[in-house]
Image (tube, rainbow, N blue to C red):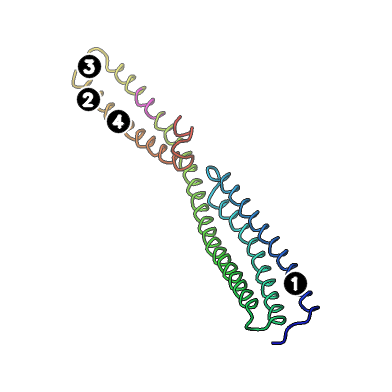
Amino acid sequence: MATPSKETIIKFKADTADYKSKINEMNQANRALTQELKLAQTQMKLTGTDVDKYKTSLSTLEKQYDIAKNKTRETAEQLQRTKQVWGENATETKKAEEALRRAQIAETEISNKIKTTTESLKEAKQAEALRNSEIGKSKQALEGLKTAHSSLKTEADKLKSAYDLQAASLGKNASETSKAKLQYDYLKQAQQNAGEQSRNLAQQLNNAKTAFGAGSEEVKG
């Protein structure tokens, strides 16, 4: 290929300087996004939900993808300028081709990350919806159990009152057999009631753990 003219070389150098300046700005913007993401991830490490974390990552990746596409476009244009000035087989052209391949690989890698992060976000949303559904059901069940437990306590009080009334009505002259039978019947019913209360409270505890968390005040209290 014929040696390019002085004017062509001057213009190429100016275009190359402009290209490098743009690439440098893109690299700086990309680094800033990476730092912002790390900061956000650190802040959300203890309190952020999986959905929030994936949303933040996806937002950053989409911005980085826009930068990567622009970088690929600018690098492709630089390659064409290099070919026009120095030819297909020049060392400068080979370097420009390598730069374009690196840009294309980086763009593809970010695209793949966006796909996997989008899928992870979808799964996290489904899991969160399921948890919220389970929490809602547990809270509803807990209220029902509390109502049932209150009824059981009322029933226990009635059993005791009925027993005391019947025991008093037997009088001093009642046989020991009658007294024993009355007491046996009462204790049998009271024991059954106590068992139902115990099972109810165990169910309340399990539902409270699901609804509020094992370490919550609702469970500890």
Res. 215 image quadrant: top left
Between disc 4 and disc 2, the foreground one is 4
Few, some or many residues within 10 Å of mark 1 (<14, 14–19, 20+) = few
Residue that appears at 51% across and 55% down? 124
The location of residue 135, given as percent across then percent down, is 49, 45
Of the numbered discs 3 and 2, the one sitting upstream in the chain is: 3
Q: Residue furthest right?
A: 7
Is 80 or 61 nearer to us in this picture?
A: 80
The disc label shown at residue 181, or none: 2
Q: Which residue is mark 3?
A: 174
Q: Are marks 4 and 1 in contact (CB under 8 Å)?
A: no
Q: CA distance from mark 4 to mark 3?
A: 22 Å
Of the numbered discs 1 and 3, the one sitting upstream in the chain is: 1
Q: Which residue type carries mark 3?
A: Ala
Q: Which structural element holds mark 2?
A: helix
The disc label shown at residue 13, or none: 1
Is 198 or 69 nearer to us in this picture?
A: 69
The location of residue 90, given as percent across then percent down, is 64, 80
Is 116 or 136 nearer to us in this picture?
A: 116
The location of residue 198, given as percent across then percent down, is 35, 33
Between disc 1 and disc 2, the foreground one is 1
Q: Which structural element holds mark 1?
A: helix
Residue that appears at 58% across and 67% down? 106
